[in-house]
Image (cartoon, rainbow, N blue to C red):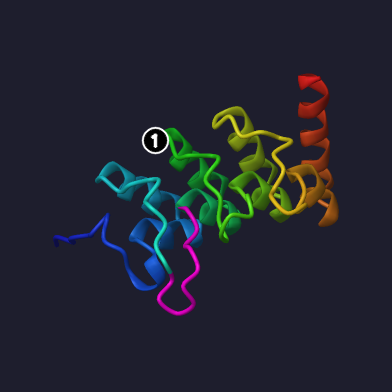
Amino acid sequence: MVVIVHTRRSLYSGFSALHWASSVGAASIVDLLLKHGADPDPAPGPDPVDGTRTSPPLLTAAFSGSSDAVTALLDVGADVTAATFGADGVTAVHVAAWKGDVGAVRALVQRGGAQANATAARGRGTPLQWAAWKNNLEVVRYLATVLLEDG
């Protein structure tokens, strides 16, 4: 059987196949799509329903709670600074901290170079604040350690 996958074609809501695989944490499919030319950082497209900007695949992977999908995207150079929801500065490390996924947070900081103290626009806080807000103690400990080591 031969399956043809359009790795760059945008599907419903501006999402590509990579977006969909990332959004459900399907790391093996993310990896397969990337190996076949999927763009880890596609230009944000408008949602046809409400006109908002789509999230980058790295952010959807962080939201899915799959540190393996996050790592697969980081391995091909996905942009850790890519934000979502307009210009509010919410990045994958914010979302992973909020979700309590210390594996994804660690990968984003150590492998991807994400800033542990990155502040989202309009006073929306840092990843440490997002983790604390959701009572994600393991993430709080990790980020506090990183920030203390960085001085």
Q: Name the residue that disc number 1 marks.
A: 76
Is 78 left or right of 112, judged from the image as shown? left
Is 96 left or right of 77, judged from the image as shown? right
Residue 110 lies in quadrant:
top right
Asked if the stretch drawn in magenta spans residue 93, the answer is: no
Q: In the image, which residues are magenta?
A: 47-56
Q: Residue at x 77, y 34 (%)?
A: 142
The vertical placement of 132 against 146, above or below, is below
Q: The C terminus is located in which quarter? A: top right
SS state under label 1: loop
- Residue 146 x/y as whole percent: 76, 27
Q: Residue at x 71, y 35 (%)?
A: 116
The amino acid type, in three-letter code, at marker 1 is Val
- Residue 5 x/y as whole percent: 23, 59
- Residue 32 x/y as whole percent: 32, 48
Specify the farthest residue to the bottom: 49
Is 77 left or right of 10, judged from the image as shown? right
Asked if the stretch drawn in magenta spans residue 50, the answer is: yes
